[in-house]
Amino acid sequence: MTVIQSLRPVFPLPRWAHVDELIASGVERANRSLPKKASRWAKAFAFADRMLKVYDRLPLKPFRKRAIQAAERWILERQEEDGSWGGIQPPWVYSLIALHALGYKMDHPVLKKGLAGFYGEKGFAIEDEKTFRLQSCLSPVWDAALAMLALEDAGLPADHPALVKAGEWLLDEQIFADGDWQVRCKGRPGGWAFEFANDIYPDTDDSAVVMIALMGAKLPARRKEQAFDRGLGWLLAMQSRGGGWGAFDRNSTRTLLRKIPFADFGEMIDPPSVDVTAHIVELLGKLGYRKGFRPLDRALRYLRGEQEEDGAWFGRWGVNLTYGIGCVLPALAAVGEEMDAPYVRRAVDWLIAHQNEDGGWGERIEGYADPKWRGRGPSTASQTAWALLGLIAAGETEQPVTHRGIDYLIRTQREDGGWDEPYFTGTGFPMDFMINYHLYRDVFPLMALSRYRRALQIE
């Protein structure tokens, strides 16, 4: 985007392609100014921004050409095998625009590869007889791992062809290439990415959930052992100094970057989050680690320190507090935590207090910003399942609150076995980029129902 901002290419759109109707106040009265930020650092950045705009108007711009060439090399070096950049739509689109503005023709191999991937079978463009739209991202690795977990919870044997086939595909998706995460981490590569191709940016959340899923599939022992050795080694190396894990980076906590004037979309850093940390703690528990293992001890201190006053945990990558609690409680159970500990009971009490009248749970995305919507919203299948996963892990299987939640899922199940869910319960950047995972409405309820059945059999 800095290349585009510097070159300022203009490609006039035909009138039929304008979207003026999206600007409620009218194009002429549209406010295109950046959000005002009140802190001293924000004001300092704003002043620097004004000075740079003066520099931008100078006839001679020292170092500009060299800077653009460096940015060009950086972009070219990060194109993925499928033609993408970063595995998601925004950097893919902006990289194509920047390179074209730099003079790359549409038949240049880099642009051809990028456009072919974008509009190809695994691309982001969806066209039918009436509409053309773009997806922001695809999540095949994440979806495959969650589907495996749901099927394993439901009792599918480890040698079932579906689990073996998915497991073999996930093993093939493990990343052993270098990436930008190595700026702050010296560990060996070995993680997994979210998408079909995003080798430069694997993430810890996918890596943990993939390994949990692989544990339940019958795969070649030697190959699985090697995958876990590299995967776990990478995860442990990515732990941040505070004990938690970010998704893509280590020790990415410089909140000063949020004060930059154009930092108006979502997030500029990747700090540790509760839900990602919980998934890694759960993996460690399932691998047999317990208190006394230093990385786990640090992670548990982080989780306890992040619990909010009312007992909830913030959900960074899912909406919201229900997701946070639904990740943390199963993780604590997996490492042998005392589930009658006061801080655990506070989380259980939060879930009980926020059950809806229909027996389900739901949170609207507005709860990220508006306290009035904290923990409130119409019931959904995925959020109900997250609450139930937390309650079951905490030993609340026989409680009325759990029975009502299970009844909600049974009562709202469709004839074909799935559930309806019109709301967005996945999060990219809270309030700015929300995600509708089409499998969430099915895989999480299946997990909850299966674990409920298993808990009843044990009791």
Image (cartoon, helix red, strand yellow):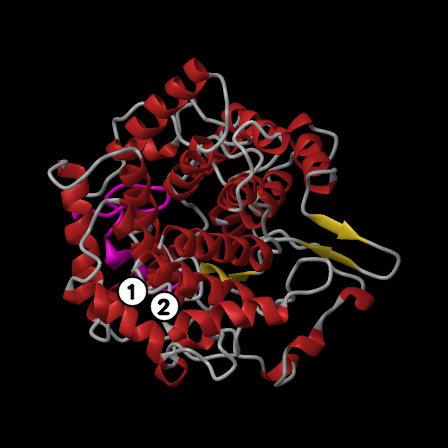
113, above or below 249, in the image: above
Asked if residue 367 is positioned above or below residue 4 in the image, the reply reads below
Residue 313 image label: 1
Q: Which residue is mark 2?
A: 321
The three-letter amino acid code for the residue at tag 2 is: Leu
Rendering coords of residue 397 (x, y %): 37, 63
Residue 320's x, y, as percent? 40, 66
Please report whichever mark, 1 or 2, sits nearer to the chain's N-terminal start. 1
* Image mark for residue 382: none
Instruction: Say whether residue 249 is magenta.
Output: yes
The answer to whether residue 260 of the structure is visible from this angle is no
- Residue positioned 40% across, 31% down in the render: 191
Residue 445: say if magenta.
no
Which image quadrant is residue 442 in? bottom right
Range covered by the magenta-colored residues: 241-266
For the residue carrying disc 1, how many other residues have a C-alpha within 10 Å: few (<14), some (14-19), or many (20+)? Answer: many
Where does the C terminus fall, quadrant-wise? bottom left
Q: Residue at x 51, y 35 (%)?
A: 198
Question: Which is nearer the eye, 300 or 233?
Answer: 300
Residue drawn at 62 percent across, 45 percent down:
97
Type of amino acid under label 1:
Trp
Tell me where residue 55 appears, x and y as whole percent. Answer: 38, 55
